[in-house]
Each structure stands twice: as C-alpha cells, then as structure tokens.
Amino acid sequence: MASVFSKIINGEIPCYKIAESESYFAFLDINPLQQGHALVIPKVEVDYIFDLNDDILMGLSLFAKRVGKAIEKVIPCDRIGLTVIGLEVPHAHIHLIPINKMSDMDFSRPKLELTKEEFENIAGKISVAFGS
C-alpha cells in the first residue's frame, strides 16, 4: 500500500507544494512547528532514510539544501534546522524548520494552526525563491 507521501506525490492527496524534481518533492508540513516548516522526500518509497541507496540519499540532501536556502529567503530565522525522525510515516523524509532557538524544533510543542491562505502564501513565496 502506498504511503501518504506517495499519495501526495501522485496528486491523490493535496499538499502545499514548494518544489519538485524528477526524483524529489518538497511541501509544507500541515502540522508545522514554525511557519515554513517543510518536508523533503524522495519520490522512491523507502521507509528508512538509511535504506536509501547512496545516490538517492546524496541527491535528497542536496535537494533539501536548495529548499532550505529558499525557506531562508522567505522566513526570517537564524537557521534552518534539519531533523530526520521517520517514525510517523513509512517513507523517508527530512524536516526543514526555520529556527531562532533550539526549542523551535521541539516536536512536543503545540503545532501552529495556519489558514489555507497562509499555507498557500508561504508555499508560493518559497516556491518562487526556490526557482530563483
């Protein structure tokens, strides 16, 4: 059975897409810790990030770097935090989170509640920054 992320890639589930390439996909987390919190995934469905072949893992890292740089252009922050947890969805993924302090990446904190318009606005701005 396809993971929720594979369904997002295939357009079966809507998302706030930021960027896409032949092998990778990036979109906003719908339960964000911060505005601009994004998920970066390979299009190949592999559960555990360290089970990805070396070329896919390297490409995922480079794609995530480009997405992170685009987020930095749009969301005021000191850095982009990167974390891989991988327990909630059986599809390798990287969280990119704009941060100003360590606690900005605390997943036990309440998540932001953004409107559809806010998500669309943020995704649009990051997508433009990604393409520039």
Image (cartoon, grey):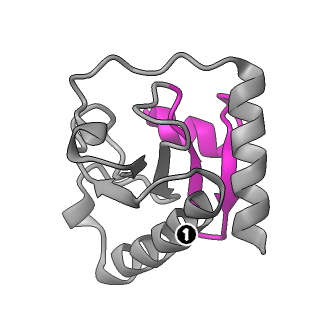
- Magenta residue check for 34: no
Depth order, front residue of 79/3: 79
Q: Where is residue 94 drawn, in percent x and y? A: 36, 54
Depth order, front residue of 94/111: 111
Around disc 1, counting alpha carbons within 10 Å, would you say few (fewer than 14), some (14 to 19), or many (20 or more)? some
Depth order, front residue of 20/28: 28
Q: Where is residue 57 drawn, in percent x and y? A: 34, 74
Q: Residue at x 65, y 55 (%)?
A: 74
Q: Give above or below for 49 relative to 109.
A: below
Q: Give above or below for 57 relative to 31.
A: below
Taking the image as shown, residue 7 lies to the left or right of residue 54, namely right
- Magenta residue check for 4: yes
Task: Please provide the residue range marked out in magenta.
Answer: 1-30
- Name the residue tied to disc 1: 69
Q: Where is residue 108 drawn, in percent x and y? A: 21, 23
Q: Residue at x 66, y 34 (%)?
A: 15
